[in-house]
Image: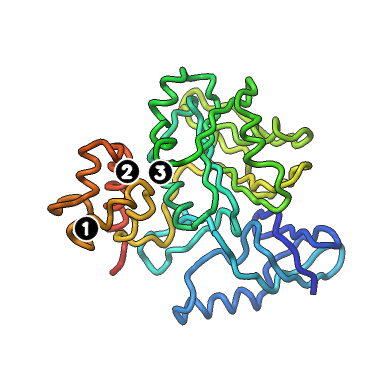
């Protein structure tokens, strides 16, 4: 049976790229039943059966139509709790943004819409949990904000070790650096995601001629972006590499993270965790907490620490022990 890569997902249909061409598939009934039985027996978590960039086995019918009958094991899965599902209950389900991710590029706007770094922190936690090899922050519309303001907002991420690119789809500033990150390696698959309205499609249109991805302006009334990408797809660059273009994500609840392990996904906290007096330190009220001492000495940025506290509290409210 043919094997291939899922390059597009939309409304229960999956376009699979095989050596013989593209085949539009649905999920076989047997695959669905087997997954339901595994969840019922507590042998598997609720998750998307098939996701973008999965490697699958298919049965081809006719007219380039087929059924997905098998999915290979995934690596470096960027995911979130499925929106609209009650977190911390048996109905909680994983929504996969991209399977087998080599690189995550999180896109925000310097302005219009106003960047929310707490949401960015959640993206970063999810990527660290997935052990994605390369994590990059891309700030589009950098021409709308003075360099000093950009550094004030995003400089902390450079300080703790993340690559931050300041770019503008409008002026072309910084696009060479973004090309080097995304294009060149034929085997590299990058997820390119962020909130709606930050200019993801505009950037991709500039990076490769002929894409003609739909774009729209930010709403003046709400200052929030409008969704223009309505499905997820893999775009193959002419000079090598794939990028996953996904619908805008306004919020992200990290998947499968227990409260006590959250600190290890804030990378600047890692050197201090073992120095705390108590092994199960929450870094809030315990005596001789090395993380709190690092915050007080400005070794850990207070806004990042506040993000940690808020997310930990949220996880504790949701987590079922």
Residue 31 % position (x, y) = 63, 75
- Residue lying at 54% horizontally and 27% vertically, measured from the top left: 218
- Residue lying at 38% horizontally and 60% vertically, measured from the top left: 257
- Residue lying at 31% horizontally and 59% vertically, measured from the top left: 259
* Pointer 1 or 2: first along the chain: 1
Vertical position of residue 320 compared to residue 96: above or below: below
Kindly identify which numbered label has been placed on residue 281.
1
Q: Is mark 2 on a helix, strand or loop?
A: helix
Corner quadrant of residue 262: bottom left
Tell me the quarter of the image containing the N terminus. bottom right
Of tags 1 and 2, which is closer to the observer? 1
Q: How far apart are marks 3 and 2 (CA)?
A: 7 Å
Marks 1,2: beta carbons within 8 A: no
Marks 3,2: beta carbons within 8 A: yes
Q: How far apart are marks 1 and 2 (CA)?
A: 17 Å
Q: Circle 2 sits on which residue?
A: 307
Tell me the quarter of the image containing the C terminus. bottom left
Residue 87 % position (x, y) = 38, 59
Vertical position of residue 82 compared to residue 113: above or below: below
Corner quadrant of residue 212: top right
Q: Mark 1 Cα within 10 Å, few/some/many (few <14, many 20+)?
A: some
* Pointer 1 or 3: first along the chain: 3
Residue 173 % position (x, y) = 61, 23
Q: Circle 3 sits on which residue?
A: 121
Residue 178 shown left or right of residue 313 in the figure: right
Corner quadrant of residue 209: top right
Q: Mark 2 Cα within 10 Å, few/some/many (few <14, many 20+)?
A: some
Q: Residue furthest top?
A: 146
Q: What element carries label 3?
A: helix
* Pointer 3 or 2: first along the chain: 3
Residue 61 shown left or right of residue 187 in the figure: right
Vertical position of residue 236 compared to residue 156: above or below: below
């Amino acid at each position: 049976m043919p094997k291939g890569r899922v390059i597009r997902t939309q409304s229960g249909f999956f376009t699979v790229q095989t050596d013989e061409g593209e085949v539009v598939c649905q999920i076989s009934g047997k695959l669905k039943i087997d997954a339901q039985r595994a969840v019922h027996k507590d042998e598997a978590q609720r998750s998307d059966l098939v996701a973008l960039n999965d490697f699958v086995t298919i049965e081809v019918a006719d007219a380039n139509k087929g059924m997905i009958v098998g999915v290979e094991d995934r690596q470096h899965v960027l995911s979130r709790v499925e929106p609209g599902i009650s977190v911390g209950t048996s109905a909680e389900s994983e929504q996969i943004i991209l399977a087998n991710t080599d690189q995550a590029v999180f896109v925000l706007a310097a302005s219009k819409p106003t960047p929310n770094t707490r949401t960015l922190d959640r993206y970063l936690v999810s990527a660290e949990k997935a052990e994605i090899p390369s994590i990059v922050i891309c700030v589009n519309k950098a021409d709308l904000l003075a360099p000093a303001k950009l550094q004030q907002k995003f400089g902390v991420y450079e300080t703790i070790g993340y690559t931050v690119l300041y770019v503008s789809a409008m002026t072309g500033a910084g696009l060479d650096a973004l090309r080097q990150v995304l294009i060149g390696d034929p085997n590299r698959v990058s997820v390119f995601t962020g909130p709606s309205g930050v200019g993801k499609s505009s950037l991709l249109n500039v990076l490769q001629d002929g894409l003609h991805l739909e774009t729209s302006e930010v709403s003046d009334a709400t200052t929030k972006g409008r969704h223009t990408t309505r499905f997820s797809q893999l775009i193959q660059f002419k000079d090598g590499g794939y990028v996953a273009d996904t619908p805008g994500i306004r919020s992200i609840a990290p998947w499968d993270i227990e409260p006590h392990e959250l600190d290890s996904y804030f990378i600047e906290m890692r050197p201090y965790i073992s120095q705390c007096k108590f092994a199960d330190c929450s870094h809030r009220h315990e005596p001789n907490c090395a993380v709190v001492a690092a915050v007080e000495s400005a070794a850990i940025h207070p806004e990042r620490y506040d993000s940690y506290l808020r997310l930990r509290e949220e996880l504790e409210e949701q987590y079922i022990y």
